[in-house]
Amino acid sequence: MDVNHPESPTPHVDKHRWPLYAAGFTTAFGAHAVAAGLGAESSDIGLTLLGLGVLLALYDVAEVFLKPVFGALSDRIGPKPVIVSGLLAFAAASLLGLWAEQPLMLAAARLGQGMAASAFSPASSATVARMSGKNTGRYFGRYGSWKGLGYAIGPLLGAIAIIAGGFAILFAVLAVLGLVVAAWVAISVPRLAPLPRPRYTLMDVWRQSTQRSFLGPTVVLAASTGALGAAVGFLPALAARENAGTLGSVAVVTVLALASSLIQPQIGRLRDAGAISDRPGMVAGLLSIAVGALMAGLVPGVVAVYASAVLIGMGIGVATPLAFAHLADSTPAERLGRTMGSAELGRELGDAGGPLLVGGVAVAAGLPWGLGALALVVGAAAFAAPWSMQPVERR
């Protein structure tokens, strides 16, 4: 048994883990479905560009500040209560969106959703880690697959809900989703008791946060998530320039999502079997993303846009489960929540920074240069990938 992640007396089976994958999908879907709808419907609900920017930022701002806090809380009281409470709070905040025609209520719903996701997202990651045993790659591959799918197809599903009945329908769907997943977690996920924790000084926390075993995977996660955020926004724009039509432009995101989601479980299994080492895998994933971004910026034609979507999606699908599994295997179980919360903070910064980088450079020099800048930054992040760990001591 893994010293860092002791197994509970009851063996964990897949039915215990599926609600956690659903929780990961919920936070990703909630973030991107509403964001896309806000952009499309901003004029109809009386939002200025500044107001739109504020509403888009509220979800991520809440997560940046609160994920490490709720991650540490899950270490203290156990992750299951934090997950269930967070999902219930997500459902309650989504109900405020039924009055989405009022910008103040929309802002309250968006902020509440972000605060709730800050609770159940890192606690879910920590639970996946504690329940993985020796198979952290396999189960983080599945978890990342569902979360990545939520990020990528959220805009499409959100648009369908808005077309069907406006923001009220979208927020109602999110409220029901939160309630259903909360009940599923409460029924199916076993309670993992908090583990005894040594007393950490501020110097201990600083040292843990700057170790390469933490900082390296977090930089990899930030780079891959930043590329995802930029690709979801800019690849459809490139496809539209190539006269792909509305359906063809949106389908680029679907291709990226499928490439990422299908490969992650496979990479996780290969990692657990010893066929892939962490550092070479992360480097290969980031380089695939960089090549895809360069291809999108430099090679004309809609086929090149779709090929870049496949390369970027595959790169994200390779780097993400390896980074999360490395974090899980290098972190003592008693502080998994804090570690996962802090790592997801890095992802949120990447999610915001990727589109800003591409957009900022594109305004000054054109979109190809913006995508080239993204490729450069993602390629540079490969140098931060941690070296493979020594084999974990067993008992």
Image (cartoon, rainbow, N blue to C red):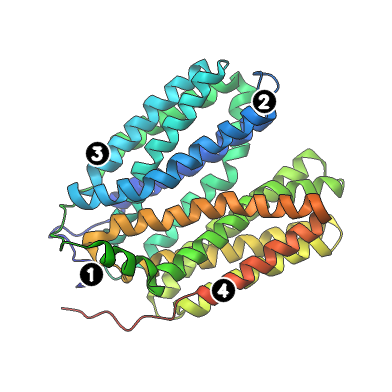
- The residue tagged 3 is 186
Which SS class for mark 4? helix
Describe the element under mark 1 as helix, strand or loop: loop
- Closest to the camera, between mark 4 and mark 3, is 4
- Residue 331 in view (yes/no): yes
Judge whether residue 121 can be spotted in this image.
no
Measuring from the top left, give residue 298's x and y in whole percent.
83, 64
Residue position marked by numbered label 1 in the rendering: 4
Crowdedness of circle 2 by 10 Å Cα count: few (<14), some, many (20+)? some
What SS does tag 3 mark?
helix
According to the image, label 2 marks what residue? 42
Amino acid type of the residue tagged 1 in the rendering: Asn
**20 left or right of 278?**
left
| Quadrant in the rendering for residue 202 | bottom left
Give how far apart the Cα atoms at labels 1 and 2 are.
Answer: 48 Å
Mark 4 Cα-neighbour bin, 10 Å: few <14, some 14–19, many ≥20? many
Alpha-carbon span between mark 1 and mark 3: 25 Å
Q: Secondary structure at mark 2?
A: loop
Q: Against 6, is 55 above or below?
A: above
Q: Amino acid at mark 3?
A: Ala
Q: Give the mark nearer the N terminus: 1 vs 3.
A: 1
Tell me whether circle 1 and circle 3 mark residues in contact (CB < 8 Å): no
Residue 192, above or below 82: below
Mark whose residue sits in front, 4 or 1: 4
In the figure, residue 102 lies in which quadrant?
top right
